[in-house]
Amino acid sequence: MNLGFFASHGGSNMQAIIDGCQNGAIQAKPVLLICNNRNAQAIERANTAGFRSEVINGKTHPEESERDQAMLSALESAEVDLIILAGYMKKIGSAVLSAFSNRILNIHPALLPKFGGQGMYGMHVHEAVIAASETESGATVHLINEVYDEGPILQQLKVPVLQDDTPETLQKRVLEKEHILYPDTVAKIARGEIELP
């Protein structure tokens, strides 16, 4: 199974999955990174792991439909089977969404359907969880569709919210779980234990 990644910044979840592929835990091969930020650390991670990265953004392709097509062409030429969003901060275009229907994974730093939707990303999620006095949070791997955070849920891992948690301390503990959950989900898809619709 060939994996394509979309990332905007550090790509730590991408690294966790690359590591799983390299140590044999995931029967899959990273083949492509699409990145909208040419200074992203994710590009260095892809280079180190020996697979191709392409910068596709509003500067390289000002028209949205052109950008969407460029991404689709890159994915098809790399023969990508599964797309993994690893901290990608842009909406996925309709051409890619339809060509890879039920083949695009995302990880969200809360227990969806709670604390999802537009504007709910990064630290905003953890701030909202603490403000709501939740006793647990966690991470969710789900398929994406046209609506933010509303695709089918594949797996979740829970994290207790401690009384003295700040958004920063909660984020750190949730991220540790993300680095376990995301590779595990990809491994189960590759082994056929999780069947995509």
Image: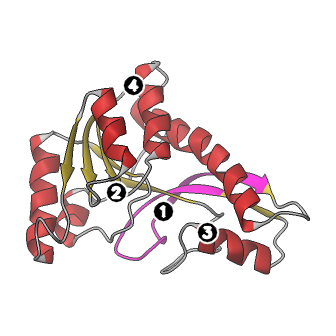
Q: Are marks 2 and 1 in contact (CB under 8 Å)?
A: yes
Task: Give me the residue at 42% from left, 52% from top.
Answer: 86
Real-space CA distance between mark 4 and mark 2, rounded to the nearest whole angstrom: 19 Å
Q: Is residue 19 above or below residue 152?
A: above
Of the residues under marks 1 and 3, which one precedes in the sequence? 3
- Which residue, given by chain and number where applicable, does mark 1 sit on? 152
Q: Amino acid at mark 4?
A: Gln
Give the foreground label among 4 and 1. 4
Q: Which mark is residue 27?
A: 4
Q: Which mark is residue 102?
A: 2
> Where's residue 165, x and y in %?
83, 63
> Could you classify mark 3 by the number of other residues whose Cα lies within 10 Å: few (under 14), some (14-19), or many (20 or more)?
some
Q: Amino acid at mark 1?
A: Pro
> Where's residue 109, x and y in %?
60, 61
Give the foreground label among 3 and 4. 3
Horizontal arrangement in the rendering, residue 62 relative to residue 111 (left or right): left
Real-space CA distance between mark 2 and mark 1, rounded to the nearest whole angstrom: 9 Å
Of the residues under marks 2 and 1, which one precedes in the sequence? 2
Q: Which mark is residue 32?
A: none
Residue 195 magenta-highlighted:
no
Give the residues in magenta: 139-159
Horizontal arrangement in the rendering, residue 4 relative to residue 132 (left or right): left
| Callout 1 secondary element | loop
Q: Which mark is residue 123?
A: 3
Q: Quadrant of the C terminus?
A: bottom left
Q: Quadrant of the N terminus?
A: top left
> Could you classify mark 2 by the number of other residues whose Cα lies within 10 Å: few (under 14), some (14-19), or many (20 or more)?
some
Task: Give me the residue at 64% from left, 64% from top.
Answer: 110
> Could you classify mark 1 by the number of other residues whose Cα lies within 10 Å: few (under 14), some (14-19), or many (20 or more)?
some
Q: Amino acid at mark 3?
A: Met
Q: Are marks 3 and 4 in contact (CB under 8 Å)?
A: no
